[in-house]
Amino acid sequence: MCELLALNSNVPTAATFSFCGFSARGGHTGDHADGWGMAFHDGDGCRVFIDTGRACDAPLAEFLRVHPLRARTVLAHVRKATQGAVDLANCHPFQREWLGRHWLFCHNGDLQDFHPTLDGSFLPVGRTDSERAFCWLMQQLRRRFSTAPDWTLLAPVLAELVPVIVRHGTFNMLLTDGRAVYAHASTRLVWLERQHPFARARLVDREVEIDLAVANAPDDCMTVIATRPLTHDEAWRHFVPGELRAFADGRCVWHRHAPGVANPHAVSSVPSQRDTVPS
């Protein structure tokens, strides 16, 4: 299947270090060689780059590894095709405009027999189960909201909608409007919060190490989300299967999970299905 990456920060931040390791999984350390994409979301604007090549050695990916484009939210995806041909129309992140915001979406998984009725407000361009799921989610949100919601309103609604998709298969996903990142794990997703005092970090997939204290200011705070840990020796936390989290300004601000789902990798357990807003 595919792999996912997201970065959410309280200030515009470069994702070159994380993408350096992550992109290696697109054909070098991983077999996700059927296309890739990366999106930079800051304020009301966003830049989306997609390519059908291998992220490990595509010229555009190399450009993004060495040229820091700073943004408060970054999404990236390396694809191993399960549904839909290797084609630009099937590369993630997918993008739609709604209520004056650019919405971006990435998916890892395989949804079987997922052909929801779409009313025409959002329609797929490609032929993936992922884009159908994105269009259906956006359609449902459009029916619920007439003004752009913040995470306090949107996260609980997503927690109601995501289980409808999960019935059809694996649904690890990232969704953002640039204000917050929403991440759901059916099977595997990890996250890491970085803040002062920053330490050194060493990539898993490439022989690269940096001093995060040099790259960041004392007040910087960011969260990195990935399918698998990108670095050695950092405190990566595993999502509980069935868990949805919202991240804003570089921190986890909300989460909910299905009760009774065991996860031997979890750093800590959450006692119930109630909404939780970390202090």
Image: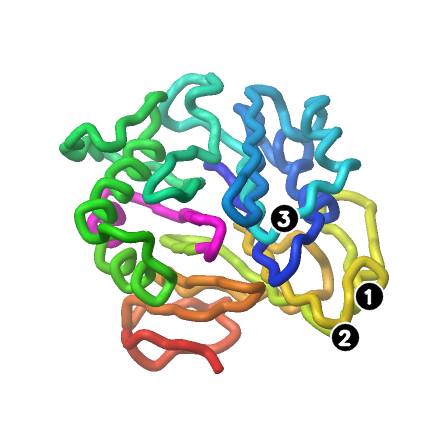
Q: Earlier in the sequence, mark 1 or mark 3?
A: 3
Task: Mark 1 and mark 3 in contact? Answer it, CB < 8 Å.
Answer: no
Which picture quadrant has residue 84? top left
Q: Residue at x 38, y 35 (%)?
A: 96
Q: Which residue is mark 1?
A: 213
Q: Secondary structure at mark 1?
A: helix
Distance between the alpha carbons at the discs numbered 3 and 2: 22 Å
Does 212 sit left or right of 123 as displayed? right
Q: Is residue 84 left or right of residue 92?
A: left
* Residue at image mark 2: 197
Residue 15, position as x, y percentages in the image: 68, 47
Which stretch is magenta? 162-181
**Foreground of the two, 169 or 115:** 115
**Real-space Cα separation, disc 1 to disc 3, in angstroms:** 19 Å
Q: Quadrant of residue 212?
A: bottom right
Front one among 66 and 11? 11
Looking at the rendered structure, the secondary structure element under dot 2 is: loop
Crowding around mark 1 (Cα neighbors within 10 Å: few <14, some 14 to 19, many 20+) is: some
55 in relation to 225, above or below: above
Q: Residues within 10 Å of mark 3 (few under 14, many from 20)?
A: many
Residue, disc 3:
71
**Residue placed most toward the observer, 98 or 190:** 98
**Residue 211 position within the rendered picture, expressed as x and y whole percent measured from the top left:** 84, 60
Q: What's the residue at 71%, 25% (across, down)?
A: 57
Q: Are marks 1 and 2 in contact (CB under 8 Å)?
A: yes
Q: Residue at x 64, y 69 (%)?
A: 235
Q: What residue type is disc 3 on?
A: Ala
Q: Is residue 186 left or right of residue 93?
A: left
Q: Position of residue 217 (x, y in %)?
A: 78, 66
